Image (spheres, helix red, strand yellow):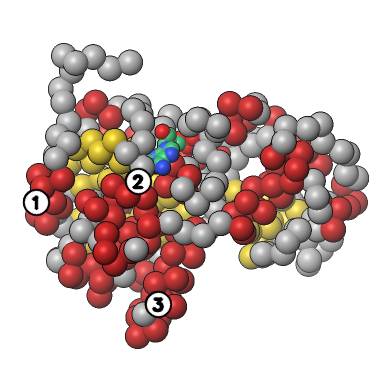
Amino acid sequence: MTSDSESKPQTDMPSFVSTLKSCKHIIAVAGAGLSAASGIPTFRGAGGLWRKYDAITLATPQAFKENPSRVWQFYHYRREKALAAQPNPGHLALAMCSVPSIREKILPGASFTLITQNVDGLSRRALDQIAEMHPELAEEIRSPVVQDSLLEMHGRLFDVVCTSSKCGHREHNLDSPVCPALAGTENVFAQNQPEPHIDVADLPKCKKCGSLARPGVVWFGEIPWHLRDIDVEVRKADLCIVVGTSSKVYPAAGYASEVQARGGKVAVFNVDRSDGDQRADFLFLGPSESTLPKALGLQDDTE
Ligand code: OAD
Ligand code: ZN
């Protein structure tokens, strides 16, 4: 709940644009709302997954231990959704900021890091799309400078990881379905049906040692990826752009206030009100796939 008596974030784009031009170290913290326009369900927004399902039974190490069949069916559903999706103009706008030669024209002299909680791979695919549209930039986009500026802190849906601590092999796997036994089970979560039981022997296996494999995502109770790199960027940042996240899950939910505590600015882009947005310096309520390209002066390039 917010009240009118609380401090009011600015809502006009021209003020944001002039702040943007003066910033030297920009971070963006993204959540599921960034991918909503691509057809990926959010967690807590309207129609969100955690409104229908209990996260504890699907996104924890304990859940996987107790019922790997159910957890794999959930991640198979999400993999199939992500495979069928395309990056939207919000992903493309952020990807453009990640490419130094494009960024130099829109945010001259600034660094840019995208910290995403999303596991769908769409922000990396947006970089690939820009490379396809601009072959002269392909080499730059493939370079570590660009690829490592995208921090997928909750892991990657298309990584498959061995559960054996002796092995731990990780592979990037775009197979559809990820194993034959999961074929067709995506409807269980799409239509809220009881799930069939799949024997552990038929679930995805490590290609190196044959042990049961798991989705390469970060579950509740596990440590997010890239925390050291994120800490460095958050400490430097003079602007934190918060996109499409309810700001309910830490540590990501805390980055904006850390930036503000050091004197930086915060701009929130969300279709709805979200935690802490009343303390933001700028608030743009609306779908980020249209507000973000506009705010970054990229609307024409991303259409
Ligand atoms: P949430 O589902 O909690 O929040 C999504 C946010 O996106 C909500 O605030 C919506 O209002 C907003 N939204 C929806 N459509 C939008 C649009 N078109 N444009 C802009 N905003 C839009 O998702 P996250 O904040 O990403 O972690 O959730 C954080 C973490 O909790 C996830 O990474 C996941 C989840 O449980 C794990 O599974 C560990
Ligand atoms: Zn293995």
Q: Amino acid at mark 1?
A: Ser
Relative image position of residue 55 (x, y in whole percent): 62, 30
Tell me what residue is drawn at x 23 percent, y 14 percent.
Answer: 3
Task: Identify the mark at residue 133; answer none if there is no mark.
Answer: 3
Q: Which corner quadrant of the image does residue 114 belong to?
A: bottom left
How far, Cα to Cα, is label 1 from label 3?
29 Å
How far, Cα to Cα, is label 3 from label 2?
22 Å
First in residue order: circle 1 vs circle 2: 1
Looking at this rendering, what residue extends furthest in the bottom direction? 136
Task: Identify the mark at residue 288; answer none if there is no mark.
Answer: 2
First in residue order: circle 3 vs circle 2: 3
Q: Which corner quadrant of the image does residue 99 belong to?
A: bottom left
Q: Vertical placement of 192 versus 265: above or below?
A: above
| Secondary structure of the residue carrying numbered label 1 | helix
Q: Which corner quadrant of the image does residue 130 belong to?
A: bottom left
The answer to whether mark 2 is within 8 Å of ligand 1 is yes
Q: Quadrant of the C terminus?
A: bottom left
- For label 1, the residue is 18
